[in-house]
Image (cartoon, grey):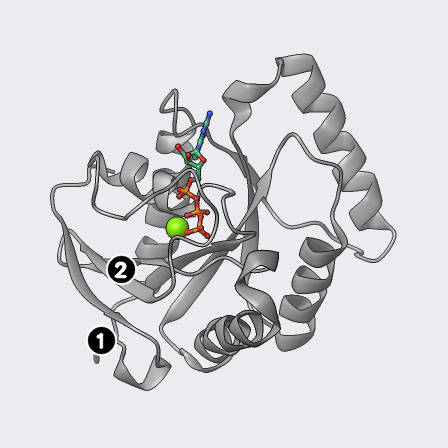
Amino acid sequence: MEVISATFVVSNTEVGKCPKGYLPEYAFIGRSNVGKSSLINMLTNQKQLAMTSQKPGKTQLINHFLINNEWYLVDLPGYGYAQRGKTGRSTMQKIIEDYIAKRSQLTCLFVLIDCRHEPQKIDLAFMEWLGESGVPFVIIFTKTDKISKGKLASNVEFYQNKMYETWEELPVMLFSSAEKKEGREEILIFIDSINKNINH
Ligand code: GTP
Ligand code: MG
């Protein structure tokens, strides 16, 4: 699938103010700094469509980007950013959870995991909640340029084994490097296949 157009539509803190209509949307979630905004830029071939930063906590709003006038990519704030303080963290958590639980147009959530790290409690607990809430999601392991292919394979295997402790079936797992522009085609094909199913 080609991304012909990608335009910023609106930023807000309330799910009720997100764009009206029935276009399918795909949102990106994960710990702060995992690379959500960078991945949106990579997928859309734009440098600064979504704001990125070396410092965690950059994205603080729900951001809708309209793709090909047919579907949305949604950039969300990250979770688990300690520097925000307890109040800031729970405000952000509420924005994220409200959006995920209430947005009926949300077609699939991409949960981003930094491929370098061992499974983290916060991500595993978050995915448990998604499962309990019946939210369709897939995992994208990000920043694959930062480790070797061998290390990536063993980290992913470790991750899968950890998930098998609580999950009967594992979600689809994809890979990305915003730095090297890898994984773009696979993610777009994945989205396209769902969009085609919706339209038939
Ligand atoms: P918040 O908005 O704070 O939740 O962060 P985010 O998940 O949107 O992360 P963002 O895209 O802002 O990226 C954080 C940092 O990681 C930036 O310095 C990016 O350049 C870097 N980064 C993102 N993706 C990759 C990648 O695939 N490879 C490498 N090497 N760096 C990456
Ligand atoms: Mg961001």
- The image position of residue 177, as x and y in percent, is 45, 27
Q: Residue furthest right?
A: 165
Taking the image as drawn, is residue 81 in sight?
no
185 horizontally vs 79: left or right: left
Cβ atoms under marks 1 and 2 closer than 8 Å: yes
Q: What secondary structure is marked by label 1?
A: loop
72 horizontally vs 95: left or right: left
Q: Residue at left 88%, top 52%?
A: 165
45 horizontally vs 153: left or right: left
For disc 2, the marked residue is: 72
Mark 1: few/some/many CA within 10 Å (<14, 14-19, 20+) = some
- The image position of residue 30, as x and y in percent, is 54, 53
**Does residue 185 lie above or below 25 as drawn?**
above
Q: Amino acid at mark 1?
A: Pro
Taking the image as drawn, is residue 95 in sight?
yes
Q: Residue at left 83%, top 40%?
A: 161
Q: Residue at left 34%, top 76%?
A: 13
Quadrant placement of the C terminus: bottom left
93 horizontally vs 196: left or right: right
For disc 1, the marked residue is: 19
- The image position of residue 55, as x and y in percent, is 45, 43
